[in-house]
């Protein structure tokens, strides 16, 4: 009987140890939400408003920068941040996280969606529970949100990338797109606009041969890029409108020493892409500031929770250091808040930006 | 003499009763719940807990037949791909104008066929192990799903279909009720029928079973077919929750499912374990995830915790075996001590 007892006790110890280290690591990774794991702070948290951010997946530097900006804005407003990131970029994982946040009675959920429609039931449930829901970066459909934070005009992003690629290859040759997941709302909208831009007669010699999906996973993006190179030996340019994809493609082109044969452009993080821009593999690319994007979302969340805005078209609010922002009509029939135009990074200015983000 | 025998027998059975893995699971389950309740003030809320079951019960449907597969000493890693293929075929056929109810039946049929093919391949090509066969079909089934949908999503289902995954009957989620029915059915099938007894017999010694006149091939095919069918059932619920489906849906589910079965005390060597263990471990892992999610533990740490739990589960029988062998060596000594006290 003694042995049974020992085993039972050791069980208890191990399990409590596990739970303990779980709680502990939550503290270290997210210093902002230690109020959740420590009992005495609970009273304080009921006074503090809770703002949750769900990003597409872990290990995505763009998402991390965005979360940083979101945190800054919320802390300026005196709120508490809960940061959640699924280990796989799937809607299933995000649904589960939304359920957990509804149970925690947060005040606001900002989400970068892995699927525009699959999250609808979960997000509607959250809104029925009185939680303000907004999307940023990658939108959810108009029935699943109050407002969307749009990084830049999708039409402009799509058109400008095709213009860049066409200019780089001299207006002639095969091009391919390396996207994120096939369900990523933002990438799909941009690709639609790329296709529209390509209809122009000046691109009659430019042919879009394939849209590949790297799922914002590094290994899959690398193998998709290699696949493109194999299937289309005459490929002249790759457009990767995703920070993970463009970095993976840059690495493949560099490893295979394809500088000058195939050019790369798209949307990338300056810190990750500096090597390839300076090396000439990617002559220039675009992006907006992910920190500002997160910051704007944080300010909008705060305005929604405090009731300054309700998400209707025409409303205005002050977004901290970004100044006054207004709510406009979005292409899908809902409303959105626009951050600004895309910013061009080339060998001239990459040096100063690569240390920023 | 006789009297003493009975007593020692009784003591032994009492001990082994509490030593059962299922009791350990219940204990861990209770501890996990207590810890969760301490960690988060939002955890103990029956309504929310019921809602939380909706997020993990979809894969639980596959746990039931997977228990049979593992008791046979085999493994089926194609279930997630089967799920994806049947869901994709359902979505495509509905969008091609097939009525929803018929599309759901097609979904179940596709899953059943996938499972049947696995079973047939395994019994016809004895030199191939189940791992190899289902590894191949895992790639093939998902590949077909990709060919059908090409990395796109398909959905736009009628609104009543959503209530399958999100609806309630009398305050209890529909998915919980359906799962309870299936769990009872599979429990009875494993423990109360000759079919179930044969499954155990085959897991312990397949050659002896064959020579004893058990139709081993037939039973194996049936078990794998059931796995395919239940993967399709899981697909029905998952698609309902997601509102749409894609070829890469349920990626990695097979490992979650196998983890739940193994944690449930069902030995991968075959022939051991009970259905109730697998069912408890579904809720154990589910509530552990939910509870730690409530305190916003990041997702990698969560995976590590579940991994550790699993290693622990696999280790326990080995520790017990070592203990038992040392116990036998010191048999006489301990007996005399026990009698004295």
Image (spheres, coloured by chain):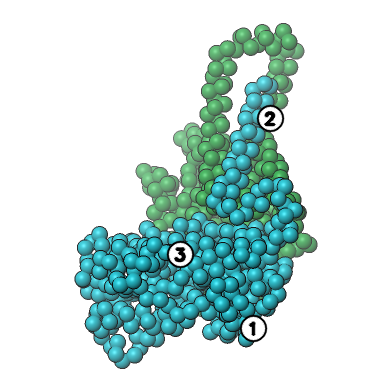
Chain colours: A cyan, B green
The residue lying at 43 percent from left, 83 percent from top is A156
Cα distance between the residues tagged 1 and 3: 29 Å
| Residue to which mark 1 is pinned | A315
| Residue to which mark 3 is pinned | A62
User: Do marks 1 and 2 share a chain?
Assistant: no
Between A118 and B87, the residue placed more toward the observer is A118
Cα distance between the residues tagged 1 and 2: 66 Å
Disc 1, SS: loop
Disc 2, SS: helix
Query: Height in image: A253 above or below B49?
Result: below
| Residue to which mark 2 is pinned | B18
Mark 3 is surrounded, within 10 Å at the Cα level, by few (under 14), some (14 to 19) or many (20 or more) other residues, namely: some
Cα distance between the residues tagged 3 and 2: 52 Å
Please tell me whether mark 1 or mark 2 is closer to you in this view.
Answer: 1
Q: Chain of mark 1?
A: A
Q: Position of residue B74 (x, y in %)?
A: 48, 43
């Amino acid at each position: 009987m003694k042995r049974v007892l020992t085993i039972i006790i050791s069980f208890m110890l191990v399990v409590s140890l596990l739970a303990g280290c779980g709680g502990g690591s939550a503290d270290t990774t997210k210093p902002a939400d230690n109020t959740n794991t420590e009992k005495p702070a609970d009273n304080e948290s009921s006074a503090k408003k809770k703002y949750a951010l769900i990003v597409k997946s872990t290990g995505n530097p763009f998402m991390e920068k965005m979360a940083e900006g979101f945190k800054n804005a919320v802390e300026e407003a005196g709120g508490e941040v809960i940061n959640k990131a699924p280990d796989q970029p799937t809607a299933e994982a995000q649904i589960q996280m939304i359920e957990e946040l509804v149970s925690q009675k947060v005040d606001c959920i900002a989400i970068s969606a892995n699927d525009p429609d699959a999250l609808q039931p979960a997000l509607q449930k959250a809104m029925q529970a009185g939680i303000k829901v907004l999307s940023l970066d990658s939108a959810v459909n108009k029935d699943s949100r109050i407002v969307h934070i749009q990084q830049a005009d999708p039409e402009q992003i799509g058109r400008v990338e095709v213009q860049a690629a066409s200019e780089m290859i001299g207006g002639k040759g095969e091009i391919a797109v390396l996207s994120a997941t096939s369900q990523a709302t933002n990438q799909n909208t941009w690709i639609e606009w790329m296709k529209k831009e390509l209809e122009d007669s000046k691109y009659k010699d430019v042919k879009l041969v394939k849209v590949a999906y790297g799922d914002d996973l590094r290994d899959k993006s690398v193998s998709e890029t290699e696949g493109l190179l194999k299937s289309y030996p005459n490929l002249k340019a790759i457009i990767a409108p995703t920070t993970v994809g463009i970095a993976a493609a840059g690495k493949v082109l560099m490893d295979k020493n394809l500088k000058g044969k195939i050019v790369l452009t798209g949307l990338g993080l300056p810190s990750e892409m500096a090597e390839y821009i300076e090396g000439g593999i990617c002559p220039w690319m675009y992006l907006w500031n992910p920190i500002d994007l997160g910051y704007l979302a944080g300010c909008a969340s705060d305005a929604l929770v405090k009731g300054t805005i309700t998400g209707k078209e025409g409303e205005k609010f002050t977004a901290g250091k970004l100044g006054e922002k207004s709510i406009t009509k979005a292409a899908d029939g809902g409303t959105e808040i626009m951050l600004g135009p895309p910013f061009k990074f080339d060998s001239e200015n990459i040096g100063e930006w690569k240390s920023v983000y | 003499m006789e009297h003493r025998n009975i007593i020692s027998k009784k003591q032994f059975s009492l001990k082994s009763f509490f030593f059962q893995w299922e009791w350990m699971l219940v204990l861990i389950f209770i501890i996990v719940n207590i810890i969760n309740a301490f960690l988060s003030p939002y955890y103990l809320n029956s309504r929310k807990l019921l809602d939380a079951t909706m997020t993990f019960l979809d894969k639980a449907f596959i746990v039931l037949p997977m228990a049979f597969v593992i008791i046979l000493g085999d493994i089926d890693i194609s279930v997630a791909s089967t799920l994806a293929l049947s869901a994709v075929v359902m979505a495509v056929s509905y969008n091609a104008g097939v009525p929803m109810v018929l599309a759901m039946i097609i979904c179940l049929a596709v899953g059943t066929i996938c499972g049947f093919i696995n079973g047939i391949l395994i019994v016809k090509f004895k030199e191939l192990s189940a791992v190899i066969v289902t590894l191949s079909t895992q790639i093939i089934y998902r590949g077909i799903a990709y060919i059908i949908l090409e990395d796109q999503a398909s959905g736009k289902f009628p609104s009543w279909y959503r209530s399958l995954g999100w609806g309630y009957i009398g305050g209890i989620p529909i998915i919980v009720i359906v799962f309870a029915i299936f769990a009872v059915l599979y429990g009875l099938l494993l423990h109360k029928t000759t079919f179930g007894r044969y499954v155990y017999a085959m897991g312990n010694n397949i050659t002896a079973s064959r020579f004893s006149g058990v139709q081993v091939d037939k039973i194996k095919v049936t078990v794998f077919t059931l796995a395919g069918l239940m993967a399709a059932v899981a697909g029905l619920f998952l698609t309902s929750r997601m509102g749409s489906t894609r070829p890469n849906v349920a990626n990695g589910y097979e490992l979650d499912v196998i983890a739940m079965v193994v944690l449930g005390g069902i030995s991968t060597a075959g022939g051991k374990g009970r259905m109730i263990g697998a069912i408890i471990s579904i809720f154990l892992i589910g509530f552990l995830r939910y509870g730690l999610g409530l305190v916003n533990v990041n997702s990698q740490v969560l995976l590590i915790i579940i991994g550790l739990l699993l290693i622990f589960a696999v280790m326990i029988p080995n520790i017990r075996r070592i203990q038992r062998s040392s116990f036998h060596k010191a048999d006489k000594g301990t007996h005399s001590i026990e009698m004295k006290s």
